[in-house]
Image (cartoon, grey):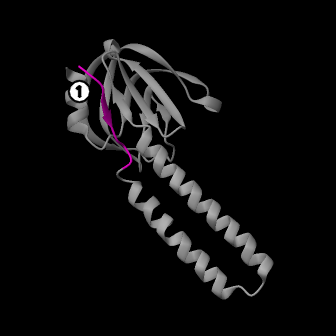
Amino acid sequence: MGDRSFGYSAQVRPFLWVFLVVTPLEVLLVELLVPWFWLRAVLLAFGVLSALLLGWQLWMLHKFKHEVDDEHLWLRYAREFEYRIPLSTIGSVTQGMTSRTLHRTRSVVDATLVLEISGSTNVALRLDAPLQVDLGRRGAHEVTKVEFWTDDPDGMVRALRK
């Protein structure tokens, strides 16, 4: 089958770029409007840190994509999490938009691992065998279904059905 990677950040990337562009303008306005040097210096440091963090987030979303190889589906969100799902456990793959608005990038709801972007998912996997997923402080859960977002749901479904 070969390795294939799929992005998932097309919905959030424009907002990150807007903030990245607006941050230097904000720093400039602070320099012009705030009379106290010490406060300008502190706000400048926060502005630079903010721009660095936004740039880092954009890079992480670009670098750590979902991937399909010969044995596994790798679902990621930047460096926050990575789940490896053996292709042999995937019973069916469907494409379709769902909205849950759980306000978390990863959750388990009714034995379904939900990896939403902007409150939505567009690919669903039904698993033949339950998998254990670790949600960190929220504990480990057994799941029989996975819903996630990808920027190319058609390509993802084709890659998983091979």
- Looking at the image, residue 22 sits to the left or right of residue 74; the answer is right
Q: In the rendering, at what x and y percent does residue 126 appear?
A: 32, 22
Q: Does the magenta stretch include residue 149?
A: no
Q: Where is residue 109 in the image (x, y as percent from the top left)?
A: 46, 32
**Residue 17 sits in which quadrant?**
bottom left
| Residue at x-position 74% and y-position 70% | 42
Horizontal side of residue 81 vs 159, given as left or right = right
Q: Where is residue 123 in the image (x, y as percent from the top left)?
A: 29, 35
Quarter of the image containing the N terminus? top left
Q: Would you say the magenta stretch is mainly helix, strand or loop?
A: loop
| Bounds of the magenta segment | 1-9
Work out whether residue 13 or residue 144 is closer to the camera in this orientation and state it: 13
Residue in the picture at 53% in, 50% down: 56
Q: Mark 1 points at which residue?
A: 159
Could you tell me if residue 136 is visible in this image?
yes
Note whether 76 is above or below 18 in the view shown: above
Q: What amino acid type is highlighted by mark number 1?
A: Ala
